[in-house]
Amino acid sequence: MTLPENPGVRGHPVVWQPPENFICRPYRGVSVQHWSGPLEEGAVKDVLLSREAYRRTEFIVLRAGDGGTALVQITCASQDALFNPITAVAWLGGPEDCTYVIRHDVDCANATALAEAAGTWPGICVVEGRYQHVNFIVRARPVEVRLVDVVPPGPPRLLDLARQAIAVDEDLPPVRLVPELLDVRALAAAVPDTHYLLPCQGAGLDLPGIVDYLDQRPVRGDWTLVGCERSRQFHRWFYGGEPDRQVELCPDRLIPADSGTGPLTLLRCCLLERGIRVEGNRATVPWGTNLSEVQAALRALTDR
């Protein structure tokens, strides 16, 4: 992690303040020290400026006996020796700004997990997480990503993959998924019929009347195709023409595109066979997507 130059000197404020959602990456740069004196800015700086620090230490969490917590950023004379004199201290937050949360199920490298542990705390949340490692998050405000997919099955594959991607990614900001699930049964009900043609049996979908499956190439019937453009392409190939009636199933077509001012949106489309497509505030992945593509799409949406 590369931090801005710390311009602080003894007795003068440091200009740089961490932005919202800031965490230490990697969190080995966070040191925790028990503090016996007052957790006050002047007193802390006087003590720390007379000390040395390990060359990888960038932030120090100070823990008082009464449970109070403070956080400072330090600058050392160099990083050449194993330990180097501290030359500047930035006071980032005292006991009124900092809370200390013990959550041994939290991955301290994951911003979303840290934000979940912080909850609604408005300041700096220091988290003692898995392996009793420690990191912090500043003014947690997860980035909301609307995720559009169809059900059943549930949970839909895209939602499942997005949750997995967020849980293992150490570079994403904190993300809050906002699922917008399109129910195939409700879509089909908009075109009442006694004979439906579905793309495949994979969804385990039950509709009224006769249900056939396109991937089984049934004998041509008088039906309503519940599917997408790829399904219609299959239909034209199999039967030489369009279905009698159609219900659109593709999230990419059902959700109108915007000019980049709408919510960050993740969805999938089977016309995209590999990779991702990013247009404004929307990222599309293939219907049969994988974890790496979903991860890339989330990074593209949130890297703004």
Image: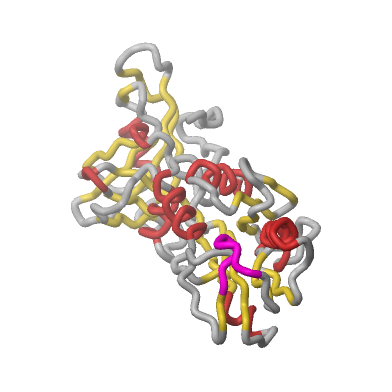
In percent of the image, x 58 and y 59: which residue is there? 145
Percent position (x, y) of residue 182? Answer: 59, 73
**Left or right of 256 on screen, residue 216:** left
216 within the magenta span = yes
**Left or right of 51 on screen, residue 121:** right
Q: Looking at the picture, does residue 42 appear above or below residue 150?
A: above
**Left or right of 200 on screen, residue 265:** right
290 within the magenta span = no
Residue 252 appearing in the image? no
Percent position (x, y) of residue 53? Answer: 32, 25
**Left or right of 115 on screen, residue 37:** left
In percent of the image, x 68 and y 54: which residue is there? 282
In percent of the image, x 38 and y 47: which residue is there? 136
Q: How many marks?
A: 0
Residue 276 appearing in the image? yes
Percent position (x, y) of residue 63? Answer: 25, 47
Q: Looking at the picture, does residue 151 appear above or below residue 191?
A: above
Query: Over which residues does the magenta segment extend?
Result: 212-219
In percent of the image, x 48 and y 59: which residue is there? 157
Instruction: Identify which residue, 1 or 99, lies in the foreground.
Output: 1
Residue at the extreme top of the image, as rendered: 80
Percent position (x, y) of residue 14? Answer: 52, 37
Instruction: Identify which residue, 284 or 65, lies in the foreground.
Output: 284
Instruction: Place residue 98 in its image quadrant.
Output: bottom left
Q: Looking at the picture, does residue 124 appear above or below residue 239?
A: above
Q: How is the image coloured?
A: secondary structure
Instruction: Identify which residue, 103 or 59, lies in the foreground.
Output: 103
